[in-house]
């Protein structure tokens, strides 16, 4: 009799645990969390693939968002570096102002990559070692928030030099690409802030 009850209880618990660990469960959580960002559609499309590992964890979601942001910034930095080399080899291809703006953009995006990388490193250290107190958690996360904010500023500054550059394919492409990178970084920062506000340990 007891064995039957134990089996019945087990059969009741297993589906519940399976549901809690299902990707669909993480997908719903990501969708809801992305609703708190400035660019929810971009947020969800870039992070939904991580549903299985994120589940219901704001910390895992913030780390995934930063990792996606880093990959996005690195791709942009590589594109800018290649474009800059191309223009250096053919100085007359674009106005001098465009070349100068491009060089500045390379520097800004490189700085953003370093800052996002630092944020991800801090998040991974926190996940591995944990925080001994709420004060320790907030101190470590304040570093992440500062670096992500700085990265967002650098990405935005990246295109400032193009304001005085005549419209053209290079200006349009760089500004459009940089804008997409900014959206990803902005979303990551929003998810980091949400994690800090809602998940600080007691």
Image: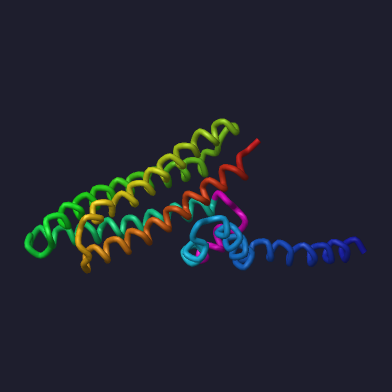
The residue lying at 34 percent from left, 51 percent from top is 156
The residue lying at 28 percent from left, 51 percent from top is 160
The way the protein has been coloured in the rendering is: rainbow
Res. 68 visible in picture = no
Q: Quadrant of the N terminus?
A: bottom right
Compared across the picture, whether 202 is left or right of 122 comes to right
Q: Quadrant of the C terminus?
A: top right
Where in the figure is residue 78, as x and y percent of width and height? 25, 58
Residue 185 part of the magenta-drawn span? no
Compared across the picture, whether 152 is left or right of 59 comes to left
The residue segment tinted magenta is 48-59
Comparing 174 with 129, the one in front is 174
Comparing 24 with 96, the one in front is 96
Compared across the picture, whether 81 is left or right of 4 comes to left
Where in the figure is residue 150, as x and y percent of width and height? 38, 43
Residue 36 falls in which quadrant of the image? bottom right
> Majority secondary structure of the magenta segment?
helix
């Amino acid at each position: 009799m007891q064995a039957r009850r134990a089996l019945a209880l087990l059969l009741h618990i297993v589906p519940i645990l399976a549901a809690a660990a299902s990707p669909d469960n993480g997908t719903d959580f990501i969708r809801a969390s992305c609703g708190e960002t400035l660019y929810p559609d971009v947020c969800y499309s870039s992070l939904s693939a991580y549903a299985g590992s994120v589940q219901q964890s704001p910390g895992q979601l913030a780390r995934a968002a930063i990792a996606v942001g880093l990959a996005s910034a690195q791709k942009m930095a590589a594109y800018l570096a290649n474009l800059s080399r191309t223009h250096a080899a053919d100085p007359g291809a674009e106005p001098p102002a465009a070349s100068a703006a491009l060089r500045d953009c390379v520097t800004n995006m490189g700085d953003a990559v370093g800052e996002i990388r630092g944020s991800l490193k801090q998040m991974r250290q926190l996940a591995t070692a944990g925080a001994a107190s709420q004060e320790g958690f907030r101190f470590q996360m304040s570093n992440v928030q500062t670096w992500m904010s700085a990265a967002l500023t650098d990405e935005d500054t990246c295109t400032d030099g193009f304001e005085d550059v005549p419209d053209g394919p290079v200006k349009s492409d760089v500004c459009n690409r940089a804008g997409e990178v900014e959206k990803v970084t902005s979303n990551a920062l929003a998810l980091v802030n949400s994690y800090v506000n809602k998940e600080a340990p007691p």
